[in-house]
Amino acid sequence: MRGKRHGKFGNMERKILITGATGFVGKTLIPYLYNNGIEDIALLVRNEDKAYRLFGDINLTIISLQKESWKDEVKKFNAEVVIHLAAFFSTKYDYATAVELVNSNLLFTTELLVALQDTDCKYFVNTGTFTEFLYGDGKYFPANLYSATKTAERSIIQYFTNLSGIKWINIILYSPYGRKNDYKKVIDYMADAMNAKAQVAFSKGEQILDFIHVDDIADFYLNLLKKIDLLNEPFEEFHLGTGEGHSIREVAQIMEDVFGKKINANWGGLPYRKFDIMHAIAPVKKNMDVLGWMAKIDIRRGMEIFRADIIQT
């Protein structure tokens, strides 16, 4: 562990515990929060060495899940706000993947909530996914086993927050992008296809999705933390996107313009999956009405940042 400094926001001092800090969103979020005055942060991570490589120049508390004492260390840190980003993502549903999805997304979440009992935690900020709603109508219909575990997670969180009086804030995350991602999604595969000698098969690319830049995601969480005491209900849910949709083919065209390269794609070479989401745009009015926040980075600017990041790495 490292020394602690108090992070002030909302005219109060807060201690923040964040899971999944070494993942795609966390790598941007942690320094962004710290550089904007939220400094009393603990990270609960699986890979302690990776956390130190990423955040070694930031004064943080790092708790390793590889240590049997992690639950005691969580209690000792005694966070007032927990941001739960950690999750295992896969669209597969073979036995090994299913076990990992349940262990990471359900068992670990349960263990964390048990560890938070009898602490000063006031807010549990969970991360869900737009793929919980296949038809974009607000009704649960999981697009894959991953999204099914995220929906199943809701009942577990509801039980523990009801038990303890912790307020539960659920963030439905739409399609994140913006920097190099170890766990590739369609934008990453399109970037790779620019340098491919053989054509890379994609679907027809007609899916209209809400692509949100990771810098905007970080800014949303900062804004949420600053205004968290305005949330009086025991449960709040926000859909984190831009409120604008772009088809994958449209994004591909913007990417080609920004990168100055053609994507070597065979559009239609892959059939749509049974539960491909064809239309998902975040309903963002509540973000503005309650938090006074909206995304600032449009898809072209986001692609410019993405290109610069790829060149640097």
Image: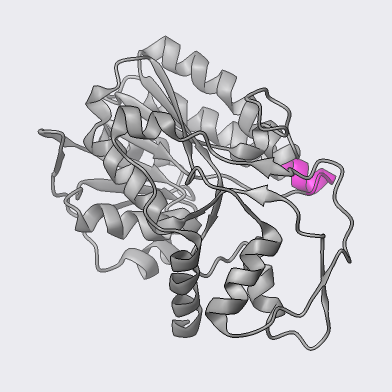
Side (left or right) of 190 relative to 201: left
Percent x, y of residue 82: 36, 35
Identify the image quadrant of residue 133. Answer: top right
The residue located at (41%, 60%) in the rendering is 27
The residue located at (46%, 57%) in the rendering is 213
The residue lying furthest to the left in this view is 11
Percent x, y of residue 72: 36, 35
The residue lying furthest to the bottom in this view is 197
Q: Quick one: 189 or 244, which is closer to the camera? A: 244
Is residue 184 visible in the rendered image? The answer is no
Q: In the picture shown, does residue 255 fall above or below 155?
A: below
Identify the image quadrant of residue 140. Answer: top right
Magenta stretch, residue numbers = 92-99
Q: In the picture shown, does residue 309 fall above or below 202?
A: below
Q: What secondary structure characterizes most of the magenta part?
A: helix
Side (left or right) of 281 relative to 229: right
The residue located at (47%, 44%) in the rendering is 85
Percent x, y of residue 190: 68, 71
